[in-house]
Amino acid sequence: MTPDVSPEILDWLDVYAKSRRHLGLPADENLLFSEIDGISVGFRVGADQTVAGAGYQAPEGSPVAAMLELFCRSSIGTPVRDVVEHGVSRLLGYARTAGAIPNATGVLLPSNAGYPFDFLQSLMTQMIAGEQFVSRYDEGRNEHHKAPASSWLELTHEERISSVKRVIVQHLTKAGQPEDIVQLSALEKDIDGFEVRVVIDFSFGVDPAGKPGMVRSLEHELKNTLDRTLQVYVIERKDESKLRRL
């Protein structure tokens, strides 16, 4: 079984070799690794705690191989906590938006979206529980369950919506994109009751392959401009007449 190497991660063979020895030798301080039934995924974490390198190993023809390749590619440059805790759900959202999950209705979770998603979530769950993750990246890992800053909490619902819309327009303008390719569909509460879930939708014609990068960059902008707890979600749109707009 030969490790697959994403073009961006030329040192994965070295990462994998080190990870295979982590039980007997001091672990690489910048490495996170998870393996189940001979299928593995690993991240090399940069000094800023974003994923600097990623790679996987899976049998040729495995139904999870393509998913792992996409997951590794999409993880580069993203905070490692966000990848490990929310990456699979985000990937699932992209797949649903792109129409890759036919007949998807209701609440879609990794556990009911098919074996590849469920297995990938199991790998991340194992990684979260590992000593390496807990000891090195646990500080602030529950960022999404912390209260927003007072500057956000003091705003009214309408003021928050207005602020989010303003940042979206500014971000698209700065990126040279039309202002109408992303719409704010809802501003929802998270499980702790804070309005931090920014639900957006893309206009028809936006290349699905470019959506994940656009979502990540927009979320980064919202976090840096408004509040670190904001999270961006994408809804599926099949009928423009049914699109919710705020």
Image (spheres, helix red, strand yellow):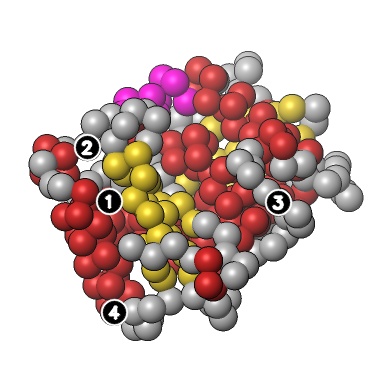
Q: Earlier in the sequence, mark 2 or mark 3?
A: 3
Identify residue for label 2: 148
Left or right: 238 as drawn, with respect to 167: right
Residue 12 in picture, x, y percent from top left? 63, 47
- Mark number for residue 223? 1
Disc 3, SS: loop
Identify residue for label 4: 173
Label 4 sits on what residue type? Answer: Thr
Q: CA distance from mark 1 to mark 2?
A: 11 Å
Q: Earlier in the sequence, mark 1 or mark 4?
A: 4
Nearer the viewer's eye, disc 2 or disc 3? 3
Left or right: 85 as drawn, with respect to 166: right
Q: Earlier in the sequence, mark 1 or mark 3?
A: 3
Residue 114 in picture, x, y percent from top left? 77, 41
Q: Which residues are magenta?
A: 133-141
For the C terminus, give its image quadrant.
bottom left
Left or right: 67 as drawn, with respect to 94: right
Identify residue for label 3: 104
Label 1 sits on what residue type? Answer: Lys
Q: CA distance from mark 1 to mark 3?
A: 30 Å
Callout 2 touching callout 3 (CB < 8 Å): no
The answer to which of 179 and 139 lies nearer the viewer is 179
- Mark number for residue 42? none
Q: Earlier in the sequence, mark 1 or mark 2?
A: 2
